[in-house]
Image: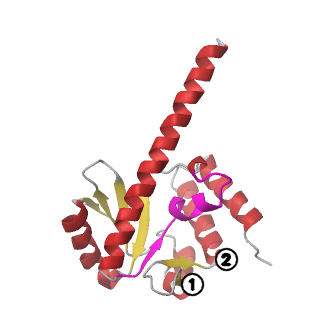
């Protein structure tokens, strides 16, 4: 009945809030390690987009995605292994999948290409479209326009390769509503 539906919704909301808080704590720990190692990094996808949702916890994520410069990948990986206990689980064409001791998945990207030639010509230029978030930080952020382009490109990649859910559509709709692109 209605009581069971309400209980189920409340349980899912609590789980979503818990998952969000755990994700943010882990993300901040990763940022601190990269800052201490003095490595430039760019938060990607959900880590960025959730900040423009009406409530950050509304944008769920299954993992944490962070881009580092390809030439600092080994240094970043080693810092995360030694400081936070991450373990490498898989090497991919554009990232290293790493798992925290608590089971949090990190995709440490060294590029954001999608194996689609036309998109990749622009995606390989990501470092040309980022700037420092703060004067003394190594955290970088994409321009609004590039973030939107990357969101479209990533959605297209999933669409072409058999898995484009509603989250990508909502992300893009929200980005187009929030950011001044004119």
The extreme front residue here reads 136
Q: Is residue 63 visible?
A: no
- Specify the quadrant that holds the C terminus: bottom right
- Specify the quadrant that holds the N terminus: top right
Give the camera-side residue of 167 and 134.
Answer: 134
Residue visible at 57% across and 84% down in the picture: 129
- In the image, which residues are magenta? 39-56
In reply to whether residue 99 is colored magenta, the answer given is: no
Where's residue 179, x and y in %? 72, 70
In reply to whether residue 43 is colored magenta, the answer given is: yes
Query: Which secondary structure, mark 2?
Result: helix
Q: Is residue 174 visible?
A: yes
Mark before the other along the chain sequence, 2 or 1: 1
Where's residue 44, x and y in %? 50, 67
Q: Residues within 10 Å of mark 2 (few under 14, many from 20)?
A: some
Q: Which residue is tagged 2? A: 145
Query: Which secondary structure, mark 1?
Result: helix
Q: Relative to 21, is 5 on the left or the right?
A: right
Residue visible at 74% across and 65% down in the picture: 178
Residue 37 figure quarter = bottom left
Q: Are marks 2 and 1 in contact (CB under 8 Å)?
A: yes
Residue 129 tag number: 1
Where's residue 2, x and y in %? 66, 15
Where's residue 107, x and y in %? 37, 62
The extreme right residue here reads 182
Residue 31 figure quarter = bottom left
Residue visible at 56% across and 74% down in the picture: 119
Q: Residues within 10 Å of mark 1 (few under 14, many from 20)?
A: some
């Amino acid at each position: 009945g209605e009581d069971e539906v309400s209980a189920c919704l409340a349980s899912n909301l609590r789980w979503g809030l818990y998952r969000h808080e755990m994700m943010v704590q882990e993300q901040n720990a990763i940022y601190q390690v990269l800052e201490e190692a003095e490595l430039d990094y760019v938060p990607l996808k959900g880590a960025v987009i959730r900040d423009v949702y009406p409530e950050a916890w509304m944008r769920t994520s299954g993992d944490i995605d962070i881009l580092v410069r390809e030439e600092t990948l080994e240094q970043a990986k080693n810092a995360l292994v030694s400081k936070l206990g991450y373990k490498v689980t898989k090497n991919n064409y554009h990232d290293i999948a790493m798992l925290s001791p608590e089971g949090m998945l990190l995709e440490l990207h060294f590029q954001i290409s999608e194996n689609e030639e036309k998109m990749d010509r622009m995606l390989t230029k990501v470092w040309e479209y980022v700037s420092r978030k703060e004067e003394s930080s190594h955290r970088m952020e994409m321009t609004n326009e590039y973030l939107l382009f990357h969101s479209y490109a990533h959605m297209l990649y999933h669409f072409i390769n058999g898995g484009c859910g509603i989250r990508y559509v909502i992300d893009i709709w929200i980005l187009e509503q929030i950011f001044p692109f004119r």
